[in-house]
Image (spheres, helix red, strand yellow):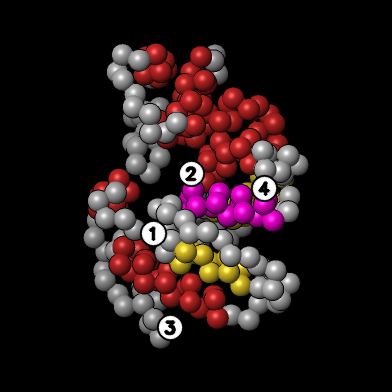
Amino acid sequence: MWDTYIPESLKESTRDKRGKGVRRKVSGLTKLPSNWMDFLRDPRNKEELFSFLTSTVAEFAFPPSKSIYITSGTSVVSKGDRSCQMSTCNHEEADTRIFVHISHALEQGMKSIKVHTVDTDVVAILVGAYFNLTLTEAQVDIWVAFKIPIGMGRNFHFYSITAICSYLEEAKSRALPVFHAVTGCDTVSAFKGKSKKSTWQAWLPNEEITATFANLFSYPFEHLEIDSDHFRKIERLI
């Protein structure tokens, strides 16, 4: 799964803040750039790279028993004798697009899911969406293969999302993505001198904020008035 790039989106402004990259033509004969981060800063490079990867993976001869699904813009390319066509998807980021694929797998009878990622956002969203996924398959068992240190090295650590959600219980699980967003993520700055751990410690005795976070996760486009009950609870936590 790859990101897509929508002009004038919130994510686009975040990319602009990271600086401009070096434009390179992407093809099978192009040498890997010496400065990979500069290459990735240019959205045109990434769009070409993702398109190249999609077409290359689609041409690979997989065993017939394997079902392969590859992002191609808003469409999904499927390969394998047992694969079935997926509907189009307009998610801008692979972080949330993953859940379209998980839901599709559950609808096809899968019960055990493993997600590979180097992004903490994906882990937070997995926890928040877990109980929604159990509505499709009550016995779903979800694992995440996550690189520690974040995004570095070759070794993945495996964490059971099912076990984490069982420990947190439903309300706190649904609330976790908004807690993660408020305390610092790709598009939100973290609080100066306050780590997620210290904010978590403030959350534990403040149970009333849990329902607010869970509500915002379920209704992300709801307008939040400054004098509303939800806003005041967030203000009190901060």
Q: Between 19 and 131, which is closer to the camera in this rendering? A: 131
Task: Say which label, 4 or 3, has the lower sequence index.
Answer: 3
Crowding at label 3, few (<14), some or many (≥20) Cα neighbours within 10 Å?
few
Residue 28 point in image, percent of width and height: 43, 83
51 is within the stretch colored magenta: no
Q: What's drawn in magenta, residue-wise?
A: 94-108
Q: Which residue is mark 4?
A: 143
State the mark number for residue 4.
1
* Alpha carbon separation for disc pair 2 and 1: 17 Å
Residue plotted at (46% across, 67% down): 72
* Alpha carbon separation for disc pair 4 and 3: 34 Å
Asked where in the image residue 189 lies, by quadrant, the reply is: top left
SS under mark 3: loop
Task: Say which label, 2 or 4, has the lower sequence index.
Answer: 2
Task: Say which label, 2 or 1, has the lower sequence index.
Answer: 1
State the mark number for residue 28.
3
Q: Is residue 174 above or below residue 93?
A: above
